[in-house]
Amino acid sequence: MTRVSIPFPYSNQITLAPPSTWGLKLLPLAACLLLSVIACGGNDAPGLEDAHWTRAQRLESLLTTLAADSMEGRRTGTAGAHRAAEFLAAELERYGIEPAGDNGTYVQTVPMARITEDNASGPRERFTLEIDYESWEALPAESIITTESNIIGIIRGSDPELANQAIVLGAHYDHLGIGSPILDSEDVPDSIYNGADDNGSGTAAVLEIARELIQGRAPLRTIVFLLSTGEEFGLLGTRYYIANPVIPLHQTVADLQIEMIGRVDDAAGGFGKSWLTGYERTTLGDQLAASKSHIVPDPRPDEDFFFRSDNVAFAVLGIPAHTMSSFGLHPDHHQPSDEVDLIDFEHMSAVVDAAVGLVRLLANGAITDWKEGGREGLQDYW
C-alpha cells in the first residue's frame, strides 16, 4: 500500500515453486511435472498438475516464486518486474483464462519514463506515464521504458443481459526492488525488498481466484483480472488501464483490489478474517454482513487505507471500489524482511475462500451502489 494523490526471454526459465510441505523426496517429481507442462504450453487440462495440492500449497508455490530473490523485488522498470509479469501471464494461460491485453496477449504495455530529479536530499527517481507527460517526445530515449506492463485476463459473463457489465478484480504485483541493505534476524545484510506480503500475497490470491472461477460455474457478469504495475509509484498501471480499459468504464460496475493478506490481523478478528476498505461507503458492506462473511469493516479507518491502494483510482470515477486486506501494520512492511517465511498460508487460504465468495457476490448478485456520503473525500483526488 502507498499514499498517493491522483491527477486526472525469461518465461521459459520460470516454473511454480513446489510447496515446501511436500518434502524433499517429492521435489524432483514435482519439478519435472511442472517443467513438462509449462514447456509444452498446453491448456487442455488447466490446473491439472497442481489439482491435488491444497489451496494453501498452491498459494505457497505461487508466492514463493513471486517473492524469490531472482525477481529482484519486482521494482517497476526492472528485469525482475518483467520476469514477474511473464510468470503471471504464463499462469493465466495455464489456467485457460482468455487473454485481454494487447494484440491477443495477456500483456498491456504501459508506456512510461524514468525521470531523475534533484531535491534537497539528493537525486530522486520518479516515473511518469506517457498519457500524463506533455513533452514526451522531448525526453531522452534512454529514459523511456517500453517493457513495463499490466497482465490482464478475462472470463466472459454467461448471462445475456449482465455479460456487458464488468467486475475488475485486481492486485499490484510490483514492489520496491533492491535498496539499502538492512541486517536480517541473523545479522546478515539483505538488500532485496521481496514484497511477499506487499503485494505478492494479493497477486497470488488473484491468480488462485481466476483458477477456481474458470473451472466452476461461469459468472453472470464479466470478470476482468488486472495484475497491475507501478502501484508503489503512484498507481501507474491502474491509471493506464483506466485510460485504456478492456471493458468500457461505464460498463464497469465494481472494482475489488486484494492487497497484503498473508498475515493474521488480530484487530480484524484473527485467523481467516480480513477487512474491506470503504465497507460503510457502499451497499457491499451490507451484503457481506447479511451473508455472514468473514470479511469485516476496516478496523483502522484513521489509516485512510481506502485512499492508499489502486481501488481509489476507480472510486474517483464513481465506480464502487474497495480493497480487501488483513494487513495488521506489521513492521516488515516496505522492508527486506517482508519474506515468504513469515506468511501464514493457512490463514491466506481462508482469506482467499472469502474472496472467492465476495467475487461471486459481485459477479452474480445485486449491483453495488454508493451510499449517501459514500464518496466523501474523493473530490480531493480529482
Image (cartoon, rainbow, N blue to C red):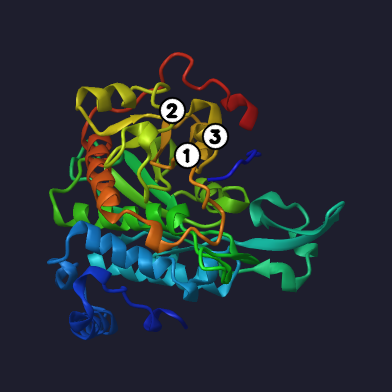
Q: Nearer the viewer, mark 1 or mark 3?
A: 3
Rendered position, 148 above or below 236: below
Mark 2, residues whose alpha carbon is within 10 Å: few (<14), some, or many (≥20)? Answer: many
- In this view, the residue in front, 255 or 126, is 126
Q: CA distance from mark 2 to mark 1?
A: 10 Å
Kindly identify the amino acid type of the residue bearing the numbered disc 1. Asn
Inspect the image, locate mark 2, and give the three-letter code of the amino acid beneath it: Gly
Which numbered tag is attached to residue 85? Answer: none
Q: Is residue 249 visible?
A: yes
Q: CA distance from mark 1 to mark 3?
A: 8 Å
Q: Are marks 2 and 1 in contact (CB under 8 Å)?
A: yes
Of circles 2 and 1, which is in front? Answer: 2
Q: Which mark is residue 307?
A: 3
> What kind of element bears circle 2?
loop
Q: Quadrant of residue 51?
A: bottom left
The numbered mark at residue 311 is: 1
Image check: 124 left or right of 52?
A: right
